[in-house]
Image (cartoon, rainbow, N blue to C red):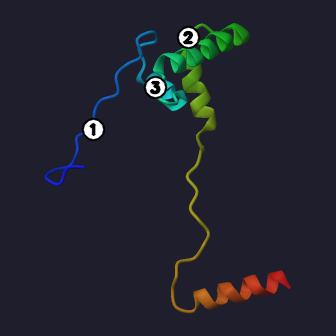
Amino acid sequence: MSRRRRAEKRPIPEDPRYGSSLVTVLVNMVMSHGKKSTARRIVYGAFERASEKLGKGDTVDMLLGALENTRPKLEVKGRRPTMVSGVKNLRRYALRTRAS
């Protein structure tokens, strides 16, 4: 870790087969113990099986659609109040009454 300046973000290279940086990120998440070729075989095999099963041609679009399905549609704020004076004691009391 450098003390002089902040480290620069390196660009994520595109995948050699699909040409997408998203596939590279997925391969890096699957990879363990530095075995990138094994991780690529796993990811590419999963893509081929999924495209055969679903009948869709472009697997990168399928991956993007799956990511869109998992993302939340709305941003939700927390309901917990901020720590202002007196709120901390009220919260403890409310938790105590529920337990009994």
**How far is disc 2 from disc 3 in space, using C-alphas?**
14 Å
Return the mark for residue 22.
3
The tag earlier along the polypeptide, 2 or 3, is 3
Describe residue 25's horizontal placement relative to residue 43 as left or right.
left
Report the amino acid beneath label 3. Answer: Leu
Residue shown at 13%/52% (left/top)?
Answer: 4
Report the amino acid beneath label 1. Answer: Lys
Return the mark for residue 9.
1
Farthest front residue in view: 33
Depth-wise, is mark 2 or mark 1 nearer the camera?
A: 1
Q: Residue 1 at x, y = what percent?
A: 25, 49
Describe residue 4's horizontal placement relative to residue 85 as left or right.
left
Q: Which residue is mark 2?
A: 58
Q: Residue 36 at x, y = what percent?
A: 47, 21
Q: Residues within 10 Å of mark 1 (few under 14, many from 20)?
A: few
Residue shown at 59%/87% (left/top)?
Answer: 87
Residue shown at 73%/11% (left/top)?
Answer: 53
The tag earlier along the polypeptide, 2 or 1, is 1
In the displayed structure, 59 sits above or below 72; it is above
